[in-house]
Image (cartoon, helix red, strand yellow):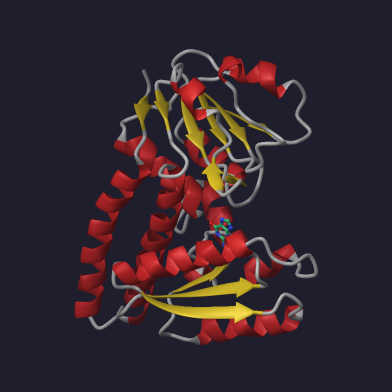
Amino acid sequence: MSKLIDGILVSEQIKQTIRKEVSVLINKGIRPCLATILVGDNHASATYVKNKQTAASKVGILTRDFKLPENIEQEKLVSTINELNKDNSVHGILVQLPLPHHIESSITNVVNYEKDVDGLTSYNLGLLFEGTPKLIPCTPLGILQLIDFYNIKVNGMDVAIINRSNLVGKPLGILLMNRDATVTFFHSKSRNLEDKLRNFDCIITAVGDRKKFTLKNNMVRDGVIIFDVGISRTNGKIQGDVDFQAVSEKASYITPVPGGVGPMTVTMLLKNTVLAATISYRNYNN
Ligand code: GUN
């Protein structure tokens, strides 16, 4: 029988601490504020952004909402971000991904690194690479918090990460390696993924398309620890990358979808916004 990793429970506990930190900042005269930028009308992205804003409001973080048209010129997007960079009342800036193809991926570097609550700028990724991170990408940070909450010891573990993005796979791999895990990255060109996965103590999967990849019971070893970051919608039903029922029979720990890593990602955005506001307060008051 596996133990369910409850992302809702853990994020509620963390949000209580965040609420207190927000009150402390408000008493010092600083109201944390998160600006979100959504380009285009991708339905899933719009829902994610709305969830992030609602969660922010519930812990006392102000939000600013920017919705820009799909065909926006790159320069216009850059100038919107730069306005927010200059605005001292804004502490966190989130540019929702994916962006339309005509926008260069380096746009994430336009965000001031001190307001980079996604941890995606070269500066923040560089700090992470060096082992001295400040603002850490939200999904990897959320997974680390789950690992700590459930007292999972990753040192010496063989960990498979099925994802190689800047948002999830790469930063997560470095964070786990810094905790002495042995990390292997898999991706769409990896050969014999199904056979290789059986060798791993922990599998973190973030594919998000069950037609391309579904983690099945026969691909994992007994006692495996599973973090499922995938989100697929089939006939209105939300599922992860994992065949949850069958894999649960073998796993020692497993995250459900929904209710696992997803709520943690949102909560880590709030945590990063409070961290960014705290850093900004210190910079202006020292
Ligand atoms: N799209 C999916 N997840 C994320 C995230 O954590 N941050 C941003 N900016 N976009 C996303």
x and y, in percent, of residue 81 in the image = 60, 79
Name the outermost residue toward the front. 235
Residue 10 position (above or below residue 215): below
Q: Position of residue 259 (x, y in %)?
A: 40, 44
**Picture quarter containing residue 145?**
top left
Relative height, residue 132 to residue 177 (above, below): below
Within the image, what quadrant is residue 242 found in?
A: top right
> Which of the pair 131/236 is nearer the observer?
236
Picture residue at 43% right of the left edge, 70% below the top: 53
User: Where does the image place residue 180, in percent across and percent down from the top left?
Assistant: 47, 29
Quarter of the displayed picture in which ligand 1 can be seen: bottom right
Can you tell which quarter of the image residue 210 is in? Answer: top right
Q: Is residue 121 visible?
A: no
Q: Look at 49% across and 46% down and name the residue there.
A: 140
Query: Is residue 49 toward the left or the right of residue 40 in the image?
Result: left
Residue at image point 52% right, 59% down: 119
Instruction: Report x, y in % for residue 225.
Output: 45, 25
- Quadrant where the C terminus sits is bottom left
Q: Is residue 135 visible?
A: yes
Name the quadrant of the N terminus: top left
